[in-house]
Image (cartoon, helix red, strand yellow):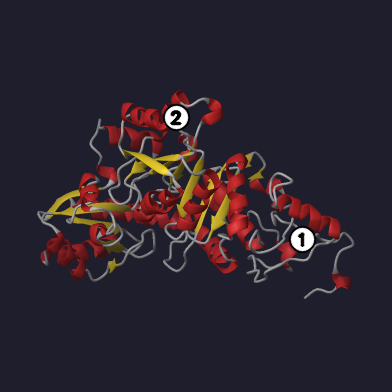
Amino acid sequence: MTTDADRPDDPIDRNTSRRRPKAEMLQIGERKLRPATLMMGHGYDAALSEGALKPPIFLTSTFMFESAAAGKRHFEGITGKRPGGAEGLVYSRFNGPDQEILEDRLGIWEEAEDALVFSSGMSAITTVMLAHVRPGDTIVHSSPLYAATEGLISRLLANFGIKWLDFPAGATRDEIDAVLHRASHGRVPLIFLESPANPTNALVDIEAVRASRDAIFAEEDRPLIAIDNTFLGPLWQCPLHHGADLVVYSLTKYVGGHSDLVAGGAMGSKSAIAPIRAIRNTIGTIVDPHTAWMLLRSLETLELRMSRAGENAAKVCTWLRDQPKVDRVGYLGFLEEGSRQADIYRRHCTGAGSTFSLYLKGGEKEAFAFLDALKLAKLAVSLGGTETLASHPAAMTHLSVPPERKAALDIGDNLVRISIGVEDADDLIADFEQALRAV
């Protein structure tokens, strides 16, 4: 440890909220640095942490103020009396060094003005909704959604007098218009999308939703458009470029990427993030510092992991679709040329991802036989990890969805959801080949 005598004459303000290097570090000369490069150091100043190359884990519940006036100023930011949040570190329910560095780096991927991190993907979604809805409101959403998100809207929020209307993930502009017209007779604070949809991989036309929203609602009454970007983000889809106001994530998945943490995120403009930050400060849904530190580790290899998984998925899906026991493969790389889904993919996406829907010939019996025979792929829910995972949505993640709704959303008993990892693709094909023989 350095002593006071070792410190420079110009002392470091150790209660600085944002531990970021100077802004010019974002580029070298005229060259703007890419996100994969910025993940190695953006938002962190080693001089503030005894020269440590990587950010330490700040396991403290509270932070010392440099003066009483500074403490007052920071609390004015926390309580909303000053815009923009706290100017310094206050208390770990509000902010912390690891969390703020993580938020800085996540914002880079989405080119967002601001970002927040949460204790889980569902705590991110819940905090976003609590920041905007009130009794009597109607939430409009695409379908299907992750089952817990649907349950939050249709069961928990319904207890507080909040209603919902939905449209299918692949809806046309006319279909979206019809639903928004119905909803516009009351207050609509939020349009919540998930694209690709979980677990069918159906894409939502974000641009059409934005155009419909802008045409139907007066500017002062326009609901925010929020989207769950977990399946393709941040590498293969950037919804803020196509009309979304907020992007939410289960950071557990591709961003965390090692199946060893649970976290969530939300990104968007400062004005869209501000009310969410206020609710997070109140109910304490911020991620813990150790998980934030692990996510910083994961961000350094995010592009490498997602690229390898995407390449593997393309090879595996190409093999699977020709197998006689496979009915069809719901993979974004196989969209029919000229179809509406292919048009959305062309406009919105830069890659097909590595999570897909495998529809076997048969039903639950055949799907279970396939899953039980897997040797390399792990029978587990979740996605986006380094390992390949396979699950049965109808009997697992979407078990609570009513049968008639599952049928309408194409969540059949023959559906297996697969998330391809970074193993050798030929080894995975060999595993799927022997598993199909058990069907």
Rendering quarter of residue 48: bottom right
Q: Secondary structure at mark 2?
A: helix
Please determine whether, in this image, residue 376 is positioned above or below residue 115. below
Instruction: Give me the residue at 49% from left, 45% from top.
Output: 247
Quadrant for the N terminus, please.
Answer: bottom right
Of marks 2 and 1, the one in the foreground: 2
Quadrant for the C terminus, please.
Answer: bottom left
Question: Where residue 219 sits: x, y (%)?
Answer: 54, 26
- Residue of label 2: 213
Instruction: Give me the residue at 74% from left, 69% from top.
Output: 50
* Real-space CA distance between mark 2 and mark 1, rounded to the nearest whole angstrom: 43 Å
Question: Where residue 145 sits: x, y (%)?
Answer: 35, 48
Left or right of 435: which side holds 300? Answer: right
The reply to whether residue 367 is visible in this rendering is yes
Q: Earlier in the sequence, mark 2 or mark 1?
A: 1
Question: For the residue marked with disc 2, what is the amino acid?
Answer: Arg
User: Label 1 near label 2: C-beta < 8 Å?
Assistant: no
Of 148 and 47, the residue lying toward us: 148
The reply to whether residue 141 is visible in this rendering is no
Instruction: Give me the residue at 64% from left, 44% from top.
Output: 27
- Residue of label 1: 15
Give the tally of numbered discs.
Answer: 2
Instruction: Give me the residue at 27% from left, 66% from top.
Output: 377
Of 227 and 299, the residue lying toward us: 227
Rendering quarter of residue 5: bottom right
Left or right of 369: which side holds 143? Answer: right
Please determine whether, in this image, residue 319 is positioned above or below residue 31. below
Q: Secondary structure at mark 1?
A: loop
Question: For the residue marked with disc 1, what is the amino acid?
Answer: Asn
Question: Where residue 174 sits: x, y (%)?
Answer: 32, 26
Left or right of 277: which side holds 320? Answer: left
